[in-house]
Image (cartoon, helix red, strand yellow):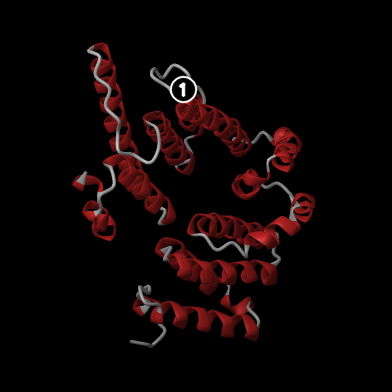
Amino acid sequence: MEEVLNQREAIYLLSDSHELDKACELFRLSYTHNDWDEANKVADYMHTLAASLYHAQLRNAADGIYVTLDTKHPLVFYYAYSYLAKSIYYQNKGKYQEARDYIMKYGEMGWFMGLDQSGQEEVERFRFLAKANLYTIELLSGKRELVPEYVQFLHNNDEEILPGLIGIAEAANLNNWDIDDLLNDFADDIEIFESYEDRGNRVYYIKLVNQLAIYYFKKQQYAVALNYVLVSLQFSVSVEADADFRTLVTLFEAYRDLATPSQQEQYQTILLRGLHNEKGINLGNYGLGVS
């Protein structure tokens, strides 16, 4: 396990959590920090361990031995999650066919033996996630004709709206689509997302706002785009999303001459807040003249 850790995440080795639960947390951290090479290593580790434990369970069951794992979820969850993690890795590498292949794998885990009721519920949960995430892959691949169908899917499944909008906005940026009407349709939802307090949704919100900033830069609506950059910067400080923070600083600096005095003042305030954050980001490389 140590081979897939960097110094930031090493603390998880000290916890009493099962290695599978540690791997899930490490993947989420890698996702937060856009560290895709690390994410891929964690996904492979998780799959190897889950598969090993599964085969051990089959052997034990054949001998009439039943061992309960001290994990937060049934074993099938981690087996499927490792496939989900791999699909996310390939999606973010732009390798959509590979991502699609892994989505199909976690979308049908009914073959998994020894499922109890909670295990069956996980199989259904991942089947639903596969349906949602397959839409995203198809949109990223340029299939705009699926947008209305996907929008209806999101309206029917509120919990998927935030991650769904990330995929739609990213697809729009990749394929030069105009989605103004769609963004107006979800304007109230986007406003609500800003009030989310939990870390997971805040990470999602950062990724959505980043895509919206890119979208409006491409449309040359610089004031709107810079406002989204500022919002994302502020959220990046709160969840310690260092990679996003550095990218956003670079992006704001590239368009700084187009920022209003109010936006520039807000920008400096956010940077200083990041500097003084208890676990703050080191801003010494950004030319702020503070130490």
Q: Is residue 242 left or right of residue 185?
A: left
Q: Residue at x 27, y 54 (%)?
A: 12
Name the kind of residue labelled 1 in the image: Met
Q: Residue at x 40, y 37 (%)?
A: 73
Residue 236 screen position, x and y as percent: 48, 66
Quadrant location, the C terminus: bottom left
Task: Using a 10 Å C-alpha cutoff, classify the residue at mark 1 as few (fewer than 14 neighbours), some (14 to 19) or many (20 or more).
Answer: many
Which secondary structure lies at badge 1?
Answer: loop
**Of residues 152 and 79, which is closer to you in this image?**
79
Q: In the rendered view, would you say 120 is above or below 59?
A: below
Q: Quadrant of residue 217?
A: bottom right
Residue 55 screen position, x and y as percent: 27, 20
Quadrant location, the N terminus: top left
Q: Is residue 86 left or right of residue 234?
A: left
**Of residues 122 and 49, which is closer to you in this image?**
122
Q: Which residue is label 1 attached to?
A: 109
Q: In the rendered view, would you say 25 is above or below 137?
A: below
Q: In the rendered view, would you say 136 is above or below 31?
A: above
